[in-house]
Every structure is written in C-alpha cells, then in structure tokens.
Image (cartoon, helix red, strand yellow):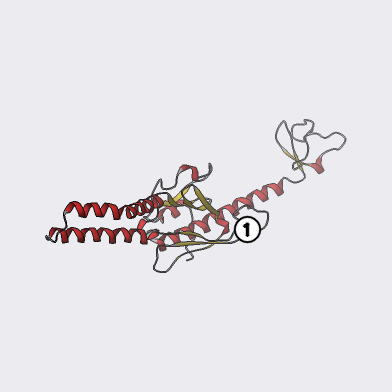
Amino acid sequence: MSGYLPRSESELALARPVSNVPGALPPEGVLFSEKIIYETRPRILSIHPIAIWVCVAFLGFVALLAIVGGAGNGYSLTVILTLGLVLGFPEFVILAWAVSSARRTSYALTDQRVILRHGDDFTSAPYHQVGQVFAKRRSSTVVFQLIPPPPGTAGPASSKPIVWRGVRGAPAVAAFAMSASRFYTLQQQQKMLRQDIVTASLEDKVVCEYCRAYIPIAELNPNNPRCPRCAAPIAVAPLGM
C-alpha cells in the first residue's frame, strides 16, 4: 500500500482514520520532542478470538443447563449456578486476561516513528527505516516492514516487522501510516539537507565574538587578525575546531 504524499501536516491530519483513540498511548511512550498524530487500541475479539469464543461457548452451556433445569428435569437452579461457578472460573480468568491484555496494548504514529506498546514493553522504528506498510488481506492486521539500518546508525538492529493486530479499519490505517512515513521521512531529509548547506557555508570561517559576523579566514591578516566589520581583534578558533 503506497499511500500518498501530503503537502502539509494539516492535509495529513485530515486523512486521520476514524479509529483514532486519543490517549491510547501512555505519556511515557512519547519522547519529549514528539507529537502523536494517530493512536488506537486493538479490538479484543480480533487479538484473542479463542479466549472470547471459549467464554461465549461456556456461557451458552450454562444457559442450556438452566433451560433444562427450568423444564423440570431434576436440576435445581442452585446446582446449576454452583456448577457454572466451578467450571466457569478458568474461563472468567481467561476473559479477564484477554481484556487486560487488550487494554495494555496500544499503537501509535508520531511525527518521528511508529510505536507498538504491549504492557511495559515498547517497540518502535523511525520512519526512514519503514520500507512498506500494508494491511493483510481480509484481516485487521497492519504490518510495517522494516529496512535494517546501516551499521553504526540509530534504530532497531533487527528488521523484524512491527505488527499491529486487531486494528479497526486496517486498510485505511495502513494507507495513512504509509503517507505519514513518506511525509516525515521527506521532511527529515529536507531538514538534514538544510543543516548540511549551513555547515558547508560556514566552513573555513570564524565568528567575531563582538558583532557576530562570519569572516572567511583567508581575509584575515595573520599578523593582526581583526574583524573587517567592527575592527575587533579575532581571538576565537575557526568553526569546527
């Protein structure tokens, strides 16, 4: 899923999926300089279907016993409820675990990276490491394929995909995530390019500590280095030293 390249953050925000759940990602999952642009939680039935259906089947079984007992077949309501509580305890434990697990799982996109949170564990990857984003066919799963970072650079050392399961409207979320990845990757590249241009423009120059003018070293008199703008003596080292 290729997504599209928004012209601005405002245009990207207009495409935010309706499954966005503000506050889904806890504050400790966000860096100081980050801004969340999308966050959500998984649907319980989608990530723990077996646990849910086992509990549903058991409740159906207890309901059937109640109907049989109510029909006068020798089962008292007390016996049925006692049996239900004894046999149903494991199912209720499983259901509680499924609900807790889903509540402690969240997904987010920021202006810097994609995040998967499960309990106290956070897995993330910067956008420049995201190669492709797609929703699995006829499912609620969104997959972020990662590109291994070059040796010595920041980012997860593994190229194992980041997988969001149980996402409502998975195709729309995947398209939005791909658009966000393209937009912020390009934005970061432009920022780095501007920094490189500024750095290159300041090479072989010094800064006057009085008037803050940038002075090419070649224009200074080595025997009496002074600022050509304010005539102050130059006593600072060249930039980069």
Give whichever of 193, 40 is nearer the camera.
40
Residue extending farthest to the left is 72
Of helix, strand and loop, which one carries label 1?
Answer: loop
Q: Position of residue 139 (x, y in %)?
A: 40, 65
Q: Position of residue 140 (x, y in %)?
A: 40, 62
Q: Is residue 108 left or right of residue 235?
A: left
Indicate the amino acid at tag 1: Pro
Residue at image x 67%, y 50%?
197
Give whichever of 187, 50 is nearer the camera.
50
Q: Is residue 113 left or right of residue 139?
A: right
Quadrant assignment for the C terminus? top right
Residue at image x 55%, y 54%?
125
Give whichever of 223, 59 is nearer the camera.
59
Numbered marks: total: 1
Q: Is residue 117 left or right of residue 18?
A: right
Q: Which residue is mark 1?
A: 149
Q: Position of residue 31 (x, y in %)?
A: 53, 44
Location of residue 50 (image quadrant) = bottom left
Residue extending farthest to the right is 223
Q: Position of residue 184 (x, y in %)?
A: 53, 54
Give whichever of 220, 78 is nearer the camera.
78
Residue extending farthest to the front is 74
Residue at image x 57%, y 57%?
128
For the residue carrying disc 1, how many other residues have a C-alpha within 10 Å: few (<14), some (14-19), or many (20+)? some
Residue at image x 18%, y 58%?
66
